Amino acid sequence: MIASRADRAARLISRPVHYAVLLLVHLELLLHPMKAGGYDWWGFFHPTADALRRIVLQYHQFPWWNPWSLGGTPLFADPQVAVISPDTLLVLLFGAVLGPKLALIGYTILGYEGTRLLCRHLFAREAAATRAEPEPAHPDRAGSPIPADGAEPSRPRAGQAPAIVLWFAVLPALLPALAGHLAVGHYSFVAFHLFPWLLVTALRWRRGPGWSVGLGVAAGFLALTYPHYMTVMSFSIAMVVIGYRLAGTRLRRRRVFRRERLLVTLAVSVALGLSLTRVCLSVHWLQRYRRPRGFYPMTIGLREGLTSLVVPFRSGRTDQVPIRPTTMGRWEVDCYVGGLSLLVVLAGLRQRRRWRFSWIHAAVPLLLLLAWTNGSPWAPSYWLRRAPPWSSLIIVTRWRLFACYFLMLAVVGSLAAIDGRGWRRVAWVLGALILCDVGFHV
């Protein structure tokens, strides 16, 4: 009865509390709504938003072209400008400074809702298995029971997630690394907040046409807004997840693979229907006007990389951080999650006297390896940069945003596992400390 009351309270109270936390970390935007930002804010995004606003409101034209930038540049085809999106509506209503700030807060809340749904999908069953672990009748590679017809195993409803998962689902939505990019005006990185929706639909599309359409909507909206770094990287991760699940299904039953192929076709059709024109124009523009520098060699040592996870960068008078063989802005390197987060993940891996690894844990070192070096033939980024669209991603350190996200997902799962072992107070205290730590550095 006590647990059920806690779960009901979490469902009712946790969301308003999390909204308050998200608004608190954006307090600077709320206190100075008309103050323009520096770096790329005043150099690109504020002028571009003002140009879009003038074209629509003053000249009553569709914003295909920006005549005030460098003698004229594409606007609708620019991957860093989302013309058909809620951003444009807010810019038209509130101006070039306040509009993007309101859109940023909206994207943050949207990303939190996607993360909350993702955590409920991932950890409701795991928490139940920690309390009472049944023997699987027909385990797959992940150790989950599979019905005889080959369909995806049923999970508990989203509302059955334990209270600790609902309360600390806000952790992956608070990333100091992402906040560093947004602080210097990398506004197109708000597309990162759409990644949780893409990932959760990529995990659930096998359930039926509804989730398959949801996957298409998430992918289409992501490509329609900012087909930039975050979009390419999000699609790369989602395609790996979908491909892995399709390959596993094909090995099990061919008739099930045929059904899932139809669901994938439905998702692709919806995504292309939403974003085909936008993507084609952006690809044409990028092919016609290639980057003058196609390769940016960089290497972060293992010691420096691990230090960046537990120690926030203190740059002193300069914002540049030494990255062999050059320097970069601290916002391109910082991936702080805190030492306590790493310890909690390690504690959560040890369950029932054995180590439990999942694809979430495996994604963290792989993504960090992609982010920390691209100058050696043994590095995945060295070869990935040779093929489009990854060849246009010259700053590979931005993969670390997804590594931090998966790491914080692992923190939520570890807290649920610790809570399931009966150490409820320990889990809640650890979660509260991590929330304060990460929220402060955001």
Image: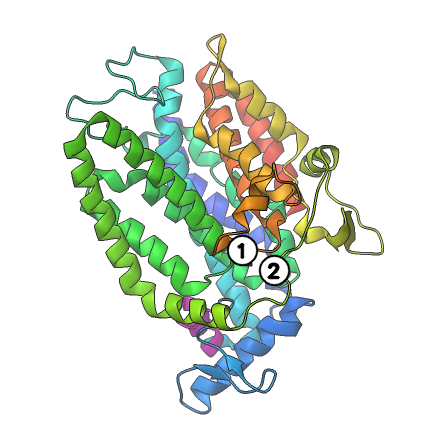
User: In front here: 170 or 262?
Assistant: 262
Q: Position of residue 133 (x, y in %)?
A: 34, 12
State yes or no: discs 1 and 2 in contact (Cβ < 8 Å): yes
Q: How is the image coloured?
A: rainbow
Kindly identify the amino acid type of the residue bearing the numbered disc 1.
Ser
Q: Is residue 303 left or right of residue 219?
A: right
Q: Which residues are magenta?
A: 82-92
User: In front here: 165 or 125?
Assistant: 125
Q: Residue furthest bottom?
A: 59
Q: Residue at x 54, y 59 (%)?
A: 392
Q: Is residue 12 visible?
A: no
Task: Residue under label 1, please give it.
Answer: 391
Task: Residue under label 2, please give it.
Answer: 294
Dot 1 or dot 2: first in sequence order is 2
Give the CA distance from mark 1 to mark 2: 7 Å
User: In front here: 168 or 20?
Assistant: 168
Q: Is residue 267 left or right of residue 288?
A: left
Q: Residue at x 53, y 55 (%)?
A: 391
Tag 2's secondary structure?
loop
Q: Is residue 169 visible?
A: yes
Most common secondary structure along the magenta stretch: helix
Residue 179 in the image: above or below residue 300: below
Tell me if residue 152 is in the magenta stretch.
Answer: no
Q: Residue at x 23, y 22 (%)?
A: 146
Q: Is residue 265 left or right of residue 342?
A: left
Q: Position of residue 4 (x, y in %)?
A: 34, 25
